[in-house]
Amino acid sequence: MRPLPFARPLLSCLGLLAMVLPAHATPQGALPRPGSGEHQLTVAALELPSRDDAQWSQRRNQVLRVLGELQPEVISVQQVQQQQGRNPACWLASRLRYSCDFVTTDPPSQALRHGNAMLTRLPVAEDGVTLLHPPGTFSAAGMMRVRVGEVQLNVYVARLRPEPDDAGPRQHQASDLMTWISATAEGLPSLIAGDFAAGTSELVRSTPGF
């Protein structure tokens, strides 16, 4: 597993963040040189409104326009609520012509399902889902292996925000996530996106190497 070492914010708007991450290792703080043969991966992170459907309906076309202008290769979407088969993250994906993987612990028969989503316009060679098992609650993490130019890399998405939200269960979730990454990364460059509900120092301790 080789974590991607560099991230640079490009946009923060309407809960949207875009980052540029080289698919090859470069010195921290350095961008790939033109003509160097190195590739970049652009990632957008989006958190949806938790309960206000009217708010999302008013803003989704604006979000769609911003994403259409950015054209990120990967979009990580948090707080996705799929109701009666209607999934707002996959709605965005269909209009952007991206694929959509919905990551949830809820069974398909459940009318309202909560989770995260991974959207991409890149070819997906492999994907997967695992449960994170803190005591008394559950969460899920997803993975997809995409190709950027000639480079394959892993994108993981997770929500490390147990209920109640405290450090013990969150560290348990992070440990499960890191164990899964170690088992699936296969030495490829990897990044983690999601909702972590923790300060920088806790994240550094919980996700060594990222």
Image: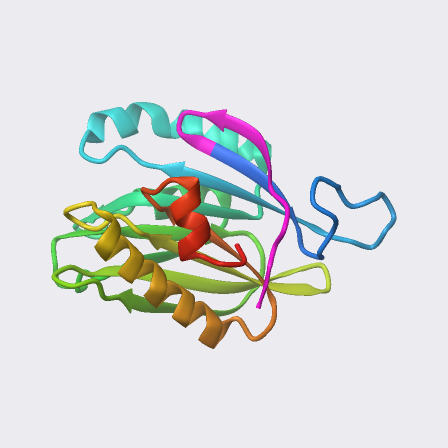
Q: Viewer-proximal residue, 65 or 130? A: 130
Is residue 174 depicted above or below 91 in this figure?
below
Quarter holding residue 110: bottom left
Q: Viewer-proximal residue, 153 or 127? A: 153
Q: Is 23 in the magenta? A: no
125 displayed left or right of 159: right
Q: How is the image coloured?
A: rainbow
Judge whether residue 99 can be spotted in this image: no
Q: Residue at x 52, y 71 (%)?
A: 185
Q: Hey, which residue is sitting farthest right in the picture?
A: 35
Quarter holding residue 156: bottom left
Tell me where residue 93 appears, x and y as whole percent: 43, 46
109 displayed left or right of 168: left
Q: Residue at x 52, y 54 (%)?
A: 210
Q: Residue at x 30, y 23 (%)?
A: 58
Tell me where residue 111 appears, x and y as whole percent: 12, 53
Is residue 9 depicted above or below 159 in this figure?
above
Q: Is 14 in the magenta? A: yes
Q: Residue at x 12, y 61 (%)?
A: 136
Tell me where residue 187 appears, x and y as whole percent: 60, 72
Judge whether residue 178 can be spotted in this image: yes
Tell me where residue 152 appears, x and y as whole percent: 63, 65
Magenta stretch in the rendered image: 1-16
Figure label count: 0
Image quarter where the N terminus lies is bottom right
Quarter holding residue 68: top right
26 displayed left or right of 8: right
Is residue 5 depicted above or below 180 in this figure?
above
